[in-house]
Amino acid sequence: MSVKQHSQFYLLSKRRFGFFYITQLLGAFNDNVFKNALIIMITFQLSKQDSDVNTLVNLSAGLFILPFFLFSGTAGQLADKFEKSALMRKIKLAEICIMLTAAIGFYIQEINLLLAVLFMMGTQSAVFGPVKYGILPQHLHKDELVGGNALVSAGTFLAILLGIITGGSLIADHENGRYWVSIAIIFVAAMGYLSSRGIPIAKAADSKLKINWNPLTETWRSFAHVKKNRVVFLSVLGISWFWFLGATYLTQLPNYTQTILGGDETVVTFILAAFSVGIGVGSLLCERLSGHKVEIGLVPLGSIGLSVFGLSVYFLAQQEYSGELMGLSVFFEQAYAWPVVINFLLIGLSGGLYIVPLYALILERSDPERRSRTIAANNILNALFMVLSALLAIALLTNGVSIPELFLVLVLLNVLVAIYIYTLVPEFLMRFLVWLLIHTIYRVKKDGLENIPDEGPAILVCNHVSFVDALIIAGSVRRPVRFVMYYKIFNVPILRFIFKTAKAIPIAGAREDKLVLESAYQEISTALSQGDLVCVFPEGKITADGEMNSFKPGVLKMLEGTSVPVIPMALSGLWGSLFSRKDKNLLSRRPRKFLAKIFIDASAPLPADTRLIDMKTTVDNLKRMN
């Protein structure tokens, strides 16, 4: 199915995704119904017994996170070794047993048993995580990977929110709450198992894998493997950093609302809902903004939003509130109320834009045979960063730092982390600049791009209208493209950084620089042998009058001795723009409006032995009126 024919919501109607989606959604919901009900029960019961409620609440959080450190390494191996749908059904059966045990704990009101159940639930979640993300690339096409991840991310955060609200609401019935919670968690676990039965088979990635049961050595081995792929490793770090931010915001939100904003529990819930909805909306926006491909240019956009809106929260409310706590209606009479809520919504939205492409990038670029173990390593690092966020908050708050000042520290750290990651992997920043160009200056209309193969080598031949042709193509084609471009354009200041990061191949005429020419042919041959897409502008120069120049024979030399398909492409609507050569004097050009419509069209593949004139004719026929 072509990109034009579906959106991410189309996946919900497909068995290969729908049953899995319901299964993981119910699991996230059930976890949080139980956790929140237990925390409220501990607080309510033990507050009357002068017991150390804070210790037990913090112990609860620790018991749920601890299994991610202990068992994620093993879980990743299991997910790679065994068929994933059967493994999911076994995990969901275990959830039913765990929830039956929880019901007994609620019935006899035995806190120690319920804490043991919480540890078992953390173990179940730690085992489920690598299977959950590892199965996606097996059931989704490449152009569905971003949409599938977006739905999972959005659904998970909303399920967490609904689970927290449901667990708190059910346990609030002092006499019968524990019975209602017991019924709910057993019912949801049973529904999760039933939905898991509809998940299609997902073959084992490495059925011959020998399980290493030592969690320490396996964790070290997983991290060592992930570090070999720098883009994947830094994506894992980026995701873990998001959990550091999110955990800090969510942990401090109740106290921040009470002591700074002056709101009661209903205000906390409302802001938490805004944050969660923001993550959901940001996640779902990723597919639309990325054009159904893994668009890592959205990651810097998300990190900018996290910094800007986090800084705004700091400036909106800094002084401690000393009056009577306000309910929702009174709270929204305050001048700062809506701005604070909207900023938390936008922090969540930025987080969605930030995290979904990173997850999709990990799934796309990690080794398929070790994909689940890569996710397991990510889960371990996520848990570690969440613990570090708690330690940092404790250290700062106990030394006189206010909660708004803690949020400011988060903003400054986020800027430093972004600079660190984007310096080490400039591909993120390059893709952001490309994305910004084609979403602010132009509206790109695409047709026929499904003719470009998802895998394997091909040569794209395209007309040359402007200085930004390569950026338009790079931002529109789902796969990475290596461009062959005139060496003088390659060396244009600022653009050189983008072209070099994108592994463009500079080329010169035979009379200009033979060494550059021969080096270009050699690099093109290597790129095609490695299965890359190579894009050539056969005219050899940007048009000076809006009409195509004759095609140079160099493209035929690139195709000699190969069976690589040729994909003719045409750009339309760029002639007369700021980046074209319509007017020599830049200041004399009539500025074009933002979001001007341009077109990129591709035809069916041509064989490698196609004549030069036939390539040019095909490209010419694809062009639209400028």
Image (spheres, helix red, strand yellow):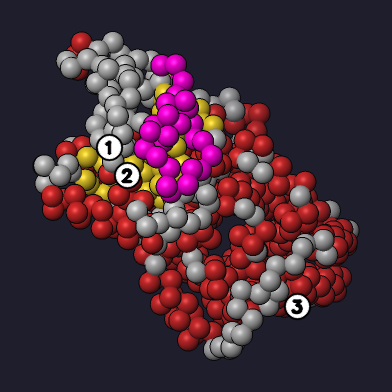
Q: Which residue is mark 1?
A: 552
Q: Between marks 2 and 3, how big is the CA–CA gap?
A: 72 Å
On screen, 442 above or below 169?
above
Indicate the secondary structure of the residue bearing disc 2. Answer: helix
Indicate the secondary structure of the residue bearing disc 3. Answer: helix
Residue 97 in percent (x, y) is at 82, 75
Query: Label 3 sits on what residue type?
Result: Leu
302 is within the stretch colored magenta: no
User: Which badge, 3 or 1, comes first in the chain's sequence?
Assistant: 3
Q: Which residue is mark 2?
A: 555
Query: Label 1 sits on what residue type?
Result: Lys
Marks 2 & 3, CB-CB < 8 Å contact: no
Q: Residue at x 16, y 50 (%)?
A: 516
Q: Which residue is mark 3?
A: 113
State the quadrant of the C terminus: top left
Q: Tell us which disc is closer to us: 3 or 1.
A: 1
Residue 132 in percent (x, y) is at 65, 64
Q: Is residue 345 visible?
A: no
